[in-house]
Image (spheres, grey):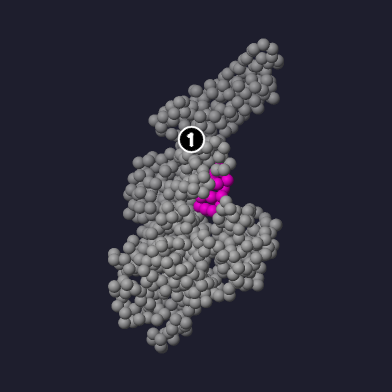
Amino acid sequence: MAELHNDPIRNIALLGHSGSGKSTLIEALLIQAGAIPDQEGQGRRITDCTPLEQQAGHSLETSLFHLHHQNTHVNLIDTPGTPELFGRAMSILPAVESVAMVINAQLGVEPVSRKSFDLMQSRKKCGLIIVNHCDAGDAKAEGILETLQDRFGPHCLPINLPSSDHSRVVDCYFQPDYAAEVAFSSVNEAHDRLVEQVIEVDDDLMDLYLEQGQSIEPPQLHDPFEQCLRDGHLLPVCFVSARTGAGVDQLLRIICELMPTPEEGNAPLFMKKEGSKMGEPGVAVSVTADPEAHTIAHVFKVVTDPFIGRMGIFRIHQGTVKTGSQLYIGDGRKAFRVNHLLKLQGDQSLEVGSAGPGDICAVAKVDNIHFDEVLHDSHDEDHFYLKPLAFPEPMSSLAIDTTRHGDEQKLSDALHRMMLEDPSLVVEHRESRNETVISGLGSVHLQIVLEKMQAVYNLEVSTRLPMIPYRETILKPSEGHHRHKKQSGGSGQFGEVFLRIEPLPRGAGFEFASEVVGGVIPSQYIPAVEKGVREVMNAGAIAGCPMQDIRVVVYDGKHHSVDSKEIAFIAAGKKAFLDAISRAEAVLLEPYMALKVTAPVWSVGDITGHLSADRGMITGSESREGDEVCIEAEAPLASVIEYSNALKSMTSGEGEFSMTFSRYEQVPGSIQKALVAEARQ
């Protein structure tokens, strides 16, 4: 069992598009620090370690690693780079002070890079840009830097530069080699721009710099450098090649010496619920990296395993967690005991005796631990929580069913576990249509979920698009009548109902009233008439869809002193309602959705044309930063139920959209005819 270390900690998450080389870079860092042996030619040994990841050839889940270097403990988090798995990638953000955006030097700034930058800014994380594959023959380092500065700002400044032959990387900060030949600019210019950017936040150092020229040393720049990172005044750019190892040693030094410790980074966004009303905003609270204070930790990842049960992975923000510690989960009243405290290295784990502020650990076999929970050892922190992440809205949905009889509970359990692991996966059971629907950030996301369902849980499922929740209504008033009479020996059944119906404004729902006088229908049978009417409202009259926006008034009828009973008036009410509907111009309604589409400006024409051709209507648009446009539109759900695939094609994967229900509108006649015919088959 490893002992508690007292070394400074750096926590850094690597985000970037698939193919940027995040996993390879992490292995190169681990090798450079001696955390794993260097065994050339054996491929990845510790990252992308699940069978599904090995089959896909890239990361599908977030993974944790750690190393020791220069008396510093570094926690590294690898993230999936597929755009549709960005929800999984962003879920780990509360665990780190720093985000490293990994850019492929051959491909430049890609969609996940832009999302990562926006997320990093919104959560006030310190940033670092790593330009990987800088040794590639078609890599254009100068062009990449210009693109970074255009997209993210002029404060993106190189801390090293690739050599003129791209065989190595030249340091421009710690020990600049001013005579080295570099691919562009010069070591002297890069060093001066970096120093001048840093001292802008320190007036005393600025005066010293003007007096001493370039004699300011890195130790003097440390504190203002950290302030620049906290304030977003500097975004260092580091060139590396994970494949050859060029620049990896410099990157490791940058992480260990320049990226912030928990004390130096921006404070975590902890809040405390005040008052008893649900939904009340909390108040900000201060959490300090004090190992002697009450323990406060945040669960940012949950893993479920058939053998070890549920594992919660958490970042300690305050206090110390030890083997044997008693921790509460949220506002729970019963504590759990930390029997085994674990450090993770990919799919391997190392048991440790204790861990302090800033460190990342895991506990296994805790069945009631969930994503985003706060762990603490005192009831004083019962109502603490971390400001929630704003996950992207689901963009694609599938209805799923088991193909093997008897697997229904197994499917339910598997979906529950997978939703615990993936906060961007949404599962709901739609009772009105008796279907289970999974929703995610795109078709690729859902396909990965289905593949895991088969590989891990041995579940075979069938999929289809979710049913469109059509509705039925009427366009004009009408009246209906039915006499229910049944005689088969002995006591019979008798009930007669007269009613009228009229349309209500869209969205008004259903109203039922009685204007019966003189006891022609005894009062105890009026609820039976309403029950018969509601059966039709639920089952539909023309296409099997629920009805809405109708007012029904029963105004006359007859009864029999012996044969009248509840079942007779249920049947009479039902048939009288159907009789009235047959003369009231019944129509189908379809849900219209309000869409917000964010996409590159060059794709606006395709997007607006596609929506207009699919019965949509553009309601507005506005320009956004970074050559993006937000388009607002309304369209029938039937036209946009697979919109994520169309948007991906039109925007090369750079577009996003959210969709919310707006209202119901009448279905065009040709579509209604087809739907009614289908329902009658």
Could one spot residue 422 in this view of the protein? Answer: yes
Residue occupied by mark 1: 470
Q: How many numbered marks appear?
A: 1
Where residue 642 sits in the image (x, y, percent)?
42, 43
Could one spot residue 184 in this view of the protein? Answer: no
Where residue 495 sits in the image (x, y, percent)?
63, 18
Picture quadrant of residue 299: bottom right
First to last magenta residue range: 412-429
The quarter of the picture where the C terminus appears is: top left
Please name whichever residue, 330 or 580, is drawn nearer the observer in this view of the structure.
Answer: 330
Q: Residue at x 47, y 42 (%)?
A: 398
Q: Residue at x 43, y 84 (%)?
A: 216
Q: Residue at x 69, y 59 (%)?
A: 335
Please name whichever residue, 450 or 494, is drawn nearer the observer in this view of the structure.
Answer: 450
Left or right of residue 335, residue 440 in this image: left
Picture quadrant of residue 321: bottom right
Left or right of residue 117, residue 181 in this image: left
Secondary structure category for the residue under label 1? loop
Please name whichever residue, 290 or 586, is drawn nearer the observer in this view of the structure.
Answer: 290
Query: What amino acid is found at the position of numbered circle 1 in the picture?
Result: Tyr
Let me know if residue 263 is in the magenta part: no
The quarter of the picture where the N terminus appears is: bottom right
Tell me if mark 1 has few (under 14), some (14-19) or many (20+) residues whose alpha carbon lies within 10 angstroms of its own.
many
Let me know if residue 417 is in the magenta part: yes
Residue at the bottom extreme of this rendering: 211
Where residue 560 sits in the image (x, y, percent)?
68, 15
Please name whichever residue, 88 or 472, is drawn nearer the observer in this view of the structure.
Answer: 88
Residue at the top extreme of this rendering: 489
Where residue 655 sits in the image (x, y, percent)?
39, 53
Q: Residue at x 47, y 71 (%)?
A: 34
